[in-house]
Image (cartoon, rainbow, N blue to C red):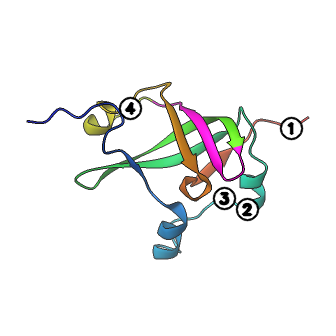
Amino acid sequence: MHQPKRGENMDLIDGIAWSKRFPTTFHLPSNDDIEALRPGDYVKLVFQAPPGLSERMWVEVIEVDGESYRGLLSNTPTNPFIRCNLDFGDELTFTRCNIIDVLMRPRH
């Protein structure tokens, strides 16, 4: 059996597409909240792995570059396939369309 390498076959869902597909049950953060994201804030992403397995996890934003982001995984995956590909603290890149929720640190 093939043993996947870390990060192999890990896809992030397109939250915008899912929200259009499931408008009454899949809500996204506002554009204002996404535009206000700064390093130290957290975003929730949905990680998908074959065959159709997924897990929602928090990622700490470490860099914002327009609509591209870098972050550190802030959860330990519970899904076995995802866990063998990702671990707490792994660095990820993602885009605005992958963000399904935000948790912002207090602004002073």
Per the image, the residue denoted by label 3 is 29
Per the image, the residue denoted by label 2 is 31
Q: Which residues are magenta?
A: 65-75
- Asked whether the beta carbons under mark 1 and mark 2 sit within 8 Å of each other, the answer is no
Mark 4 or mark 1, which is nearer the start of the sequence? 4
Q: Where residue 66 sits in the image (x, y, percent)? A: 72, 51
What's the amino acid at mark 2? Asn
Along the horizontal axis of the image, is 101 left or right of 9? right
Per the image, the residue denoted by label 4 is 86
Along the horizontal axis of the image, is 26 left or right of 11? right
Does the magenta stretch mainly form a helix, a strand or a loop? Answer: strand
Query: As displayed, is residue 62 above or below residue 27?
Result: above
Which of the labelled discs sits on residue 107, or is there none? 1
Mark 1 or mark 3, which is nearer the start of the sequence? 3
What's the amino acid at mark 3? Pro
**Disc 1 versus disc 4: nearer the observer:** 4
C-alpha separation, residue under disc 1 versus residue under disc 2: 17 Å
Neighbour tally class for label 4: few under 14, some 14-19, many 20 plus, Cα within 10 Å:
many
Q: Where residue 28 sits in the image (x, y, percent)? A: 61, 61
Mark 2 or mark 4, which is nearer the start of the sequence? 2
Neighbour tally class for label 3: few under 14, some 14-19, many 20 plus, Cα within 10 Å:
few
**Disc 3 versus disc 2: nearer the observer:** 2
Query: As displayed, is residue 75 above or below residue 30?
Result: above
Q: Secondary structure at mark 4?
A: loop
Q: What residue is shown at x 78% (from left), y 58% (from top)?
A: 32
What's the amino acid at mark 4? Leu
C-alpha separation, residue under disc 3 versus residue under disc 2: 7 Å
